Each structure stands twice: as C-alpha cells, then as structure tokens.
Amino acid sequence: MIAVLKSGTTPDQVQHLVAWLKNMSLDVHISEGAEVTVLGLIGDTSRVDMDLLKSLDMVETVKRVSEPFKQANRKFHPNDSIINAGDVRIGRGYFAMIAGPCSVESEEQIIEVATAVKASGANILRGGAFKPRTSPYAFQGMKGEGIQLLLKAKQATGLPIVTEIMNISTLDLFADVDIIQVGARNMQNFDLLKELGKTRKPILLKRGLANTLQELLMSAEYIMSEGNENIILCERGIRTFETYTRNTLDLSAVAALHELSHLPVVVDPSHATGKAKMVSPMACAAVAAGADGLMIEVHNNPSCALCDGAQSLTPQQFDDVCQRVNRIREAMA
C-alpha cells in the first residue's frame, strides 16, 4: 500500500503519521520527491483502514500495490535512484561505463587493461576473481589473490572495482570492493542475497538465464528487505531457443524495468551475445533503449584469455565502442 501526502505536509506531520502506522506493525518506506512525499507501507496492510487514512488532511491518495515487490517498486519510490560507487554515480542521468577482463590473470594484465579502459572513458573496472564455470575443469579464477590484484589496479588508476561473489563465506575478502556482483547463477540464492542486504555495499544484480523481470525484482527485494537499497540491476541476456548467440539480449527489459522500478539498469552485451563483433551494436542499442550503463569485457590479448576470450574486446575496440556510445548519448540529450 502507498499513501501520497499533500504538498506542504510538514516533517512533524509525516513523522507523526509514520509513528501511527508503525504501531500497526508495519514497515514504512519514506520517499521524498520534489513536490510530494510517498509513504510505502510494507507488511500486513489489511489492518489499515483505508477510508480513515484517506480522510486525513495531509493525505492526497491511498492505493494498494498489487506487485509482490515493494521497496524496488517505482510506486513506492517515484524518483530514479542514484547509486554511489566510490566517486562514481549511477542512475538518474549518471552513466556507468564498466569494463575489464572476464577474469583477473596477473598483475600486469589487470593494470594494463585498467589503464587502457580508463583512458577510453570507463569509470568502473570489472574483473572476475571467483569464476562460476560450467565445467569443473575450467579456470576457476584467482580467488582472494585476484581481488588483491584488482585492488592494486584500483590504486594505480583510481577506478572503483566490481567483482563477483560466489559464496557468503568469502564476504570478508570483499571489504574493499566497491560493488559486489551477484551473477546470473546466484540471482535466486536467497541466503546470499539476504546477507548482502546487511552490508550496505552497492550490489550489481544480474538477471538469471531463465528468469522473469518480476523474479529479478523479487531478488532485489530480498536485498532491500534487509536494509540495503544500493542495487544496480543488470540485463545480461536470457536463454532462448536461439543458438547463434550465447544468449538473447532482451533490451525490452531496460524500458520495462525503468517502468516497474526506480533502480538503475545496466546492460552486459558481452555475456548476452558471446561474440566480440556483436558487442558494439548491442552496446549502442542498449544506450538508445535508455540503459544507465554498460558492462563490457576487455582483454589485452583476447586470443590468449583464460576465460571468455571470444566475447572480449581489445582496448582499441573498446575505445571505438566508447566513442560510438558517447555520440548516441549526446544525440539523445
């Protein structure tokens, strides 16, 4: 349920109303916009007398929210959220260009790539330290050592870093990581999501291979229900009957998620297509669709990459993508 308060309602009136609602064992989410304040009521709202609430002088309207996700719902939070990662902002017009290798392989490699992508316009460095792989015999990442190398690249370039967590038992290793990524395979690892909700760190939440948008938003709700509202949604392609590409990039998800939720949405065209030559056109299409950022894999020598070399761009190719993306963003502005 949401209650929209009238313009001119004082902070004391808001707090008095919130206290009254909390006495009904409800959680109250307050969203203050430029003109109105919206109260999102979470819990068993059947005990709330809607007619009584509507009759209050300070209340403009009262509506029930049918969607199961509440805190991630735009109805609860009409204005776009801005997520801060280091000195980088994402959402509400602030654009994130996230780039780096699929996996961290060496200090020389990660610092070389980080330096190159920053020069081209990237403002966040990605790199896999823990790698979920289909085959148990494939390279599984450098784990804790990989995170330490990412931190060295951060120190060398100033770029905030994002890397994927696989198991909550390793959370201590992520203390200095700016954004924790939850991969597609862990999107519905609810115990992990609840623990990450207690961290207050920005979480980049990837859509699962065969999950609906509502399921993605419900996963975000798990994190938010524990108090962490710093969530970035990521569309990375879904599994369909098409076999030419690695996955099918669902760009309609960008528009749909912006309609349903206030959370920023970034697009990963590298995992979506699995082909380096398709990353640039899909990145441009994502920007045109209104994405709040891109996440692109870049390797200094893709043919020798230990993981996903076929979908990785060279630094020069990434530079070309950045120039194209900037032109599209300028045209849209």
Image: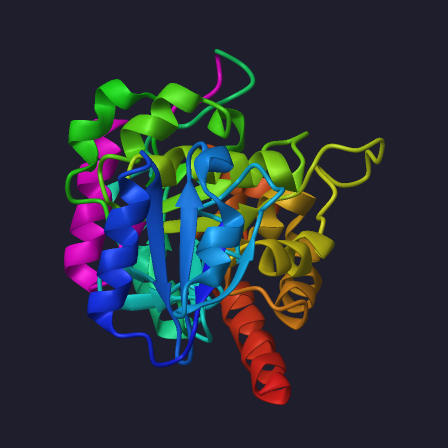
Q: Residue at x 49, y 39 (%)?
A: 304
Task: Measuring from the top left, give residue 108's x and y in whole percent.
Answer: 26, 48
Rendered residue at 50%/30% (across/down): 187
Give the percent coordinates (x, y) of residue 329: 57, 80
Side of 328 where 195 appears, left or right: left
The reply to whether residue 100 is in sight is no
Task: Identify which residue, 16 or 290, lies in the foreground.
Answer: 16
Say which residue appears at 24% left-offset and 18% top-offset: 169
On whether residue 93 falls in the magenta region, the answer is: no
Residue drawn at (72%, 49%) of the image:
250
Q: Quadrant of residue 173?
A: top left
- Quadrant assignment, res 103: top left
- Please tell me which residue lies in front, 109 or 213: 213
Q: Is residue 194 above or below residue 81?
A: above
Magenta span of residues: 137-162
Is residue 148 within the magenta segment?
A: yes
Where is residue 27? Give x, y as percent: 33, 41
Residue farthest toward the top in the current orientation of the protein: 136
Q: Is residue 280 visible?
A: yes
Residue 246: percent from left, percent from top? 70, 37
For this view, does 296 lie left or right of residue 162? right
Quadrant of the drawing holding the C terminus: bottom right
Query: Viewed as shown, does residue 78 lie left or right of 289?
Result: left
* Vertical position of residue 119 compared to residue 161: above or below: below
Q: Which is nearer the eye, 72 or 324?
A: 72
Q: Is 71 placed above or below 125 here?
A: above
Q: Residue furthest right?
A: 241
